[in-house]
Image (cartoon, helix red, strand yellow):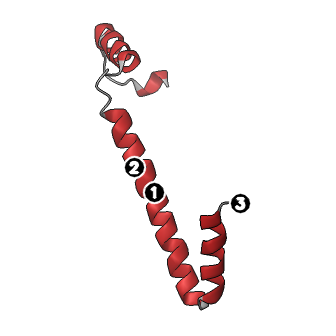
Amino acid sequence: MSAETEELIHICDALPQAKRIEVADFARFLLAREKDEAWDRTLGDPDGHPKLDAFVKDALAEGSEALDLDRL
């Protein structure tokens, strides 16, 4: 276990229950933000997305037709 993790545990143990809940909520917020930033980096990849581009090109080449509910 890292020193930071141990310190966080000691801090949380010293806090009242309501404040521990706030710390946990903030940690979840930071984790979600990290995931969002990772997703943004993936979407902003300067090399593009060749597999996605190929899929879109193939899908557009197939054309489209109206949805026929009887064929479902």
Kindly identify which residue carries mark 2.
Answer: 36
Q: Are marks 2 and 1 in contact (CB under 8 Å)?
A: yes
Kindly identify which residue carries mark 3.
Answer: 1
Q: What element does badge 2 sit on?
A: helix
Location of residue 12 in the rendering, given as x and y in whole percent from the top left corner: 61, 81
Q: What element does badge 1 sit on?
A: helix
CA–CA distance in space, label 2 to label 1: 6 Å
CA–CA distance in space, label 3 to label 1: 22 Å
Mark 3 vs mark 2: in front:
3
| Residue that appears at 47% across and 71% down | 26
Question: Where is 43 relative to 18, above or below?
Answer: above
Label 2, residues with CA under 10 Å away: few <14, some 14-19, many ≥20: few
Question: Where is 32 relative to 56, above or below?
Answer: below
- Of residues 4 and 29, the one drawn nearer to the viewer in this rendering: 4
Sequence-wise first label, 3 or 1 = 3
- Of residues 45 and 66, the one drawn nearer to the viewer in this rendering: 45
Report the amino acid beneath label 3: Met
CA–CA distance in space, label 3 to label 2: 26 Å
Report the amino acid beneath label 1: Ala
| Residue that appears at 51% across and 65% down | 28
Numbered circle sitting on residue 32:
1
